[in-house]
Amino acid sequence: MLRILLRLGAGLMALAFLLAGTTAATAGDGPAFVKPPESKRLFPAQDNLLERVQEIVEEKCAFAGCHAGTNAPKGLDMSEEMLVANLVGVKSADTPWLRVKPGDPANSYIIKKLRGAPDIKGDRMPRDSRPLTAQEISAFEAWIKSLPAGMKAESPKLEYAAAFPGLTLANLPTAETLEKGALLYRIAHRFKSPTNRGFDELFGLDGGARMMTQIGFPLSNDFFVTVERQGLQATFEIGVKWRFLREKTDGSIPVSAAIYTGVDWATLKGITDPANPKQQNGSPNFLKRTAGERFAFFAQLPVSKQLGNWLSAAVVPGILLNGNIGMTDEDPLLTLGVAGRVALSQKYALFAEIVPILSGDESAATIIEGIPRTENGVRVFNDTFTAGLEIKAGGHVFHLFLANSAGNITSQYMSGGDLDFTNGYFRLGFNIYRVLNYPF
């Protein structure tokens, strides 16, 4: 009965989300992954000097993974469209100084950062790269000196909205991608033991963890390729995401939508062949590493919407084929993921997600850590549920959460969780995302 209510609730949430999708998104201080439209120069008198500064910034700072596009540190997008609006007359996020004080380069914080002055916070700009030459810094100073004192820049209206600052939540994919030129690195942990083990096992931290690493890169601003590896069954995931709708702040495109599809390949050597588990001599008969039963195929359709400045929602219908390596000819697994995010500030947000299994749960290969739960001799599991805290810091996104499932990759979390979250059983987990520029 509980599973039916959960599925009904997920369906109602999905319906409400789709109805909300007919309304226009509210523009404002939203998450990253937003590229504003090209705008006319705000200060034509400084065009020549500004063009030189923009050339320097584009080469040294304003590329994906740094001060542009995805998760720009401190929200400082220095791309051509946003450079003036985010610098001129804007207070630094770390100090009382203005980033650019018009007419006064000596008291502009960006000059201090470029020169590596002793009173700056953090590293000299550009970080992890060679400092600007004296001629390049002089170009910045000349541009700042040419600006009339007290001048304020008006931010251009953002063209696109982005419901989520990352490519996934704890598990579910979002409809977001990376801008071309960026590189994603992600580490995901799920601790094996539940939190109710108490202080003696440090609330499950002593029980070891399942770890997944991921590298992803965009082939275009809307097409993303990823490779992941999970230690459980030595499983690799190869996936591609194509964003075919991108939400606009004027409501002309009310939602963002993407297709994420791929394959999970269990490469662990000693996996028994479910169709022929024993050889004639009685010894185990293992699957060949390239056997078809080792490959699980999935497809998901994340649809997301930004509902005002602080609220975001997503629905993620999905299908999993051949997801149980211990069974042959199992039914397809159909799921309907639902997720929500509430921003507490520009840095912190709360999120939750649930992945109800709509069909095929009888053959779901739920990851079991410990003793399986049974009722009347039948194995029992729960739909995957996760809730936690999101933290954005510089080029990082952190997810700290409680989860009832042990798997990190798509076929594993789609197949349900082994802990009963309705009775308060969870395990701790975290994700760390880092967006970098290409190292070549």
Image (tube, rainbow, N blue to C red):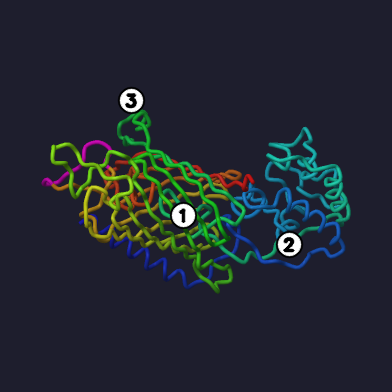
Alpha carbons under labels 1 and 2: distance apart? 29 Å
Q: Earlier in the sequence, mark 3 or mark 1?
A: 3
Q: Is residue 86 left or right of residue 194?
A: right
Q: Main secondary structure of the magenta part?
A: loop
Q: Where is 405 relative to 25, above or below? A: above
Residue 188: percent from the left, percent from the top? 44, 42
Looking at the image, which residue is at 73% across and 58% down? 85
Pick whichever of labels 1 and 2 is earlier in the sequence.
Answer: 2
Q: Residue at x 43, y 45 (%)?
A: 388
Three-letter amino acid code at disc 2?
Answer: Glu
Measure the C-alpha gap from mark 3 to mark 1: 33 Å
Mark 1, Cα crowd under 10 Å, few <14 / some 14-19 / many 20+, is many
- Earlier residue among tags 2 and 3: 2
Find the distance from the CA under tag 2 to the CA under tag 3.
56 Å
Q: Does the segment drawn in magenta span residue 372?
A: yes
Q: Give how far across and how far down residue 26 sits, in percent.
A: 56, 65
Identify the magenta region.
368-377
- The residue type indicated by label 1 comes to Arg
- Residue located beneath label 3 in the image: 200
SS of the residue under disc 2: loop
- The residue depicted at 54 percent of the width and 48 percent of the height is 184
Q: Which mark is residue 154?
A: 2
Badge 1 vs badge 2, beta-carbon distance below 8 Å: no
The label shown at residue 341 is 1
Q: Secondary structure at mark 1?
A: strand
Dividing the picture into quadrants, the one containing residue 46 is bottom right
Farthest-out residue, front: 280
Q: Is residue 37 magenta?
A: no
